[in-house]
C-alpha cells in the first residue's frame, strides 16, 4: 500500500484490516476537524475579548471537553500505521520468527494494558453519568467526553487483536512479510516515505535523480 509500511493482500485478515482502517481514518479525520474547530474557537475568543470585550462563555470548559476527542480518537489509527513511539533498538535487529514472536508477546502485553484502561475508563464514565458530573463554569456534562475514552480504546483493542492474529500467523507459517501490521523501517526509508507523502512521488524521484 502506497505511503505506508502495512502490507495488504486478498486474505480475510487483510480485508478486516482495511475495513477497520476505514473506521480509524474517519475518526482520525474527526479528531483533525476538532483541532481545527478549537483553533477557530481560540481565535474568536481572543478577538472577542480584546476587541469587543465579549469572551466566549465557558471557553475553558469547551476546550477541556473537546481535548479528549483529538487525544484519543486517533490512537488506533496511529497504531495501525506504526506511528506510536517504540523502543526497537533490540527488536529491530531481529528477523523472521524471533521478530514475530517478540511482536506477538508485545501485542499481548499491550492488549492487557488497554483492557485495564477500557474498564477503568468505562467505570469513570459511568460514575460521571450517574452523579451528573459537570464542568465548573457553564456546567457542561462531562460524561460524553469520558465515554469517548473507552470507545476509542476499544477500537484500539480491536486493532491490536488484528495485529496479534497477523503476528501469530506469521510466526506459525514462517511468513517474511505479514499483512495488516506495520513493518519496522530504517531512518532512510521513513524519511523517503514522508517526503513522498509531503511532496508527491514524482518530485521525490526528480530529486533523487539529481
Image (cartoon, grey):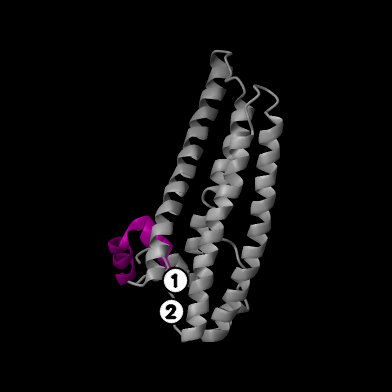
Examine the rendered structure and indicate whether residue 14 appears above or below residue 58. Answer: below
The magenta-colored residue range is 192-210
The chief SS type of the magenta part is helix
Instruction: Tell me, yes or no, if residue 87 can be seen here.
Output: no
Q: Position of residue 192 (x, y in %)?
A: 41, 67
Q: Residue furthest front?
A: 130
> Could you tell me which quadrant the N terminus lies in?
bottom left
**What residue appears at the point 45 percent right and 39 percent down from the top-left corner?**
33
Examine the rendered structure and indicate whether residue 149 appears above or below residue 37. Answer: below
Give the SS element for disc 1. helix
Front one among 85 and 102: 102
Q: Position of residue 50 (x, y in %)?
A: 58, 18
Q: Which residue is mark 1?
A: 189
Magenta stretch: includes residue 101: no
Apparent side of residue 147 relative to residue 5 in the rendered image (left or right):
right
User: Closer to us: mark 2 or mark 1?
Assistant: 2
Apparent side of residue 47 relative to residue 204 in the rendered image (left or right):
right
Q: Which residue is mark 2?
A: 177
**First along the sequence among labels 2 and 1:** 2
Q: Position of residue 99 (x, y in %)?
A: 56, 81
Front one among 203 and 183: 183
Front one among 31 and 112: 112
Amino acid at each position: 500500500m502506497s505511503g505506508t509500511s502495512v502490507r495488504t493482500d486478498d486474505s480475510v485478515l487483510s480485508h478486516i484490516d482495511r475495513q477497520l482502517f476505514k473506521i480509524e481514518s474517519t475518526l482520525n479525520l474527526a479528531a483533525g476537524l476538532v483541532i481545527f474547530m478549537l483553533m477557530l474557537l481560540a481565535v474568536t475568543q481572543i478577538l472577542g475579548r480584546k476587541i469587543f470585550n465579549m469572551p466566549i462563555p465557558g471557553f475553558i470548559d469547551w476546550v477541556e471537553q473537546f481535548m479528549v476527542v483529538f487525544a484519543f480518537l486517533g490512537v488506533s489509527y496511529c497504531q495501525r500505521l506504526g506511528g506510536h513511539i517504540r523502543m526497537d533498538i533490540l527488536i529491530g535487529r531481529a528477523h523472521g520468527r524471533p521478530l514475530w514472536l517478540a511482536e506477538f508477546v508485545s501485542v499481548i502485553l499491550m492488549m492487557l494494558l488497554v483492557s485495564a484502561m477500557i474498564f477503568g475508563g468505562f467505570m469513570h464514565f459511568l460514575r460521571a453519568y450517574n452523579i451528573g458530573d459537570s464542568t465548573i463554569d457553564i456546567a457542561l456534562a462531562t460524561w460524553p467526553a469520558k465515554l469517548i475514552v473507552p470507545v476509542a480504546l476499544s477500537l484500539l483493542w480491536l486493532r491490536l487483536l488484528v495485529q496479534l492474529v497477523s503476528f501469530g500467523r506469521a510466526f506459525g507459517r514462517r511468513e517474511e512479510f505479514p499483512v495488516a501490521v506495520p513493518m519496522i523501517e530504517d531512518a532512510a526509508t521513513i524519511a523517503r516515505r514522508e517526503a513522498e507523502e509531503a511532496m508527491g512521488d514524482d518530485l521525490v524521484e526528480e530529486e533523487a535523480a539529481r
